[in-house]
């Protein structure tokens, strides 16, 4: 059993030693435990410090001073390398020491036992004192929406403290650049991967997030990811719902014109039948797009099966 712990980093020279303070060096049931850093444009001494801490794998997601690749691409870089290195389990944690390194054995145990393909640390955000009441609400609401969209039990949708089995690594395909947390949950549910949640605590805050500039940016981008992923995996349903909305609008407006026509007062209500007719046309077009999107989804699944076989080689 080989486990690789990966840490995406952007100038973490001060916090990386804290991540390794309680990092396990041996885990029961694990033959090899290795560490990898994903350098997302570090301009400080993060890499040299990581070498002193025993990190074996160093991956560059973006060069210093260049356009950052963001967390989604950084995670994909690490995932691809973990498969290449023959890892049975990939653990992801953060370089700001938010997550408890000492709980990695508990995090991977469900995968070792064969109960889960993905294990996610539930931060129990309602108990985090540093989170404002509004942020706690948004975290809970976001997890609720993700649950409704994916059909999976989701207590903490954006937790980055996770473990992935080799099977999950082969099946998951990261298609978002900003982040990957919601993306992978929705993919896991649609692809039949089992997710288990482990309750964790969080460490004291060391710095502000570099990924999230403000709460509204997070809401906008996470919301966009949820809608995009739902459309990708439920295209016919998505377009059918939109088609139904325009169908109802068209029916109401044409019905309104019909009412005034039969009582002899249709003059001045022609706009209702015009807008209603346009709504009907849009409804038909959306329904047709839904059929085409569903056919494209079949092709996407076939492509993903090919990618899974390639990753398994």
Image (spheres, helix red, strand yellow):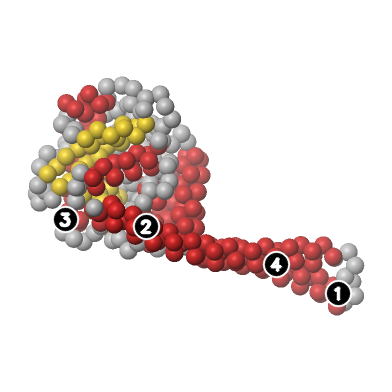
Q: Which residue sits at x=40%, y=37%?
A: 70
Of the two numbered discs 3 and 1 in the rendering, the one whose residue sits closer to the viewer: 3
Real-space CA distance between mark 2 and mark 3, rounded to the nearest whole angstrom:
25 Å
The answer to whether the residue labelled 3 contacts the one labelled 1, judged by CB atoms less than 8 Å apart, is: no
The answer to whether the residue labelled 2 contacts the one labelled 3, judged by CB atoms less than 8 Å apart, is: no
What is the residue that sits farthest to the bottom in this orientation? Answer: 262
> Looking at the image, which is closer to me, 69 or 137?
69
Residue 112 shows which numbered tag?
A: 3
Badge 2 crowding class, 10 Å Cα cut-off, few under 14, some 14 to 19, many 20 or more, is: some
Real-space CA distance between mark 2 and mark 4, rounded to the nearest whole angstrom:
36 Å
Disc 1 is placed on an element classified as helix
Q: Which residue sits at x=34%, y=39%?
A: 74
Q: Mark 2 points at which residue?
A: 304
Residue 1 shows which numbered tag?
A: none
Of the two numbered discs 1 and 4 in the rendering, the one whose residue sits closer to the viewer: 4
Of the two numbered discs 1 and 4 on the same chain, state the one appearing first in sequence.
1
Disc 4 is placed on an element classified as helix
Of the two numbered discs 2 and 3 in the rendering, the one whose residue sits closer to the viewer: 2
Q: Position of residue 147 (x, y in %)?
A: 41, 59
Q: Position of residue 165 (x, y in %)?
A: 23, 53
Q: Name the residue under label 4.
A: 280
Residue 261 shows which numbered tag?
A: 1
Of the two numbered discs 2 and 4 in the rendering, the one whose residue sits closer to the viewer: 2
Left or right side of 159 for 231? right
Of the two numbered discs 2 and 4 on the same chain, state the one appearing first in sequence.
4
Disc 2 is placed on an element classified as helix
Q: Quadrant of residue 66?
A: top left
> Looking at the image, which is closer to me, 34 or 23?
34
Q: Position of residue 62 (x, y in %)?
A: 37, 31
């Amino acid at each position: 059993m080989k486990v690789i712990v990966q840490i995406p980093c952007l100038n973490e020279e001060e916090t990386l030693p804290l991540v390794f303070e309680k990092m396990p060096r041996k885990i029961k049931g694990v033959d090899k435990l290795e560490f990898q850093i994903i350098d997302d444009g570090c301009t400080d001494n993060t890499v040299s410090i990581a070498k002193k801490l025993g990190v074996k794998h160093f991956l560059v997601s973006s060069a210093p001073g260049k356009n950052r690749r963001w967390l989604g691409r950084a995670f994909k870089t690490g995932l691809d390398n973990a498969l290449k290195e023959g890892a049975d389990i990939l653990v992801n944690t953060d370089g700001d020491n938010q997550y408890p390194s000492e709980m990695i054995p508990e995090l991977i145990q469900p995968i070792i036992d064969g109960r889960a393909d993905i294990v996610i640390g539930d931060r129990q955000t309602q108990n985090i004192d540093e989170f404002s009441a509004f942020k706690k609400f948004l975290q809970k609401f976001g997890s609720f929406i993700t649950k409704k969209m994916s059909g999976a039990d989701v207590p903490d949708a954006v937790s980055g403290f996770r473990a992935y089995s080799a099977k999950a690594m082969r099946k998951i395909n990261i298609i978002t650049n900003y982040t990957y947390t919601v993306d992978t949950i929705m993919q896991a549910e649609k692809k039949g991967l089992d997710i288990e949640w482990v309750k964790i605590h969080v460490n004291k805050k060391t710095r502000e997030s570099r990924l999230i500039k403000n709460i509204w940016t997070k809401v906008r981008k996470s919301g966009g990811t949820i809608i995009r992923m739902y459309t990708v995996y439920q295209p016919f349903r998505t377009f059918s719902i939109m088609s139904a909305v325009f169908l109802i609008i068209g029916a109401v407006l044409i019905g309104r014109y019909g009412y005034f026509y039969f009582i002899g007062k249709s003059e001045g209500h022609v706009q209702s039948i015009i807008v209603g007719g346009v709504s009907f046309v849009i409804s038909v077009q959306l329904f047709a797009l839904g059929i085409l999107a569903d056919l494209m989804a079949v092709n996407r699944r076939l492509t993903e099966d090919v990618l899974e076989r390639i990753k398994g080689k």
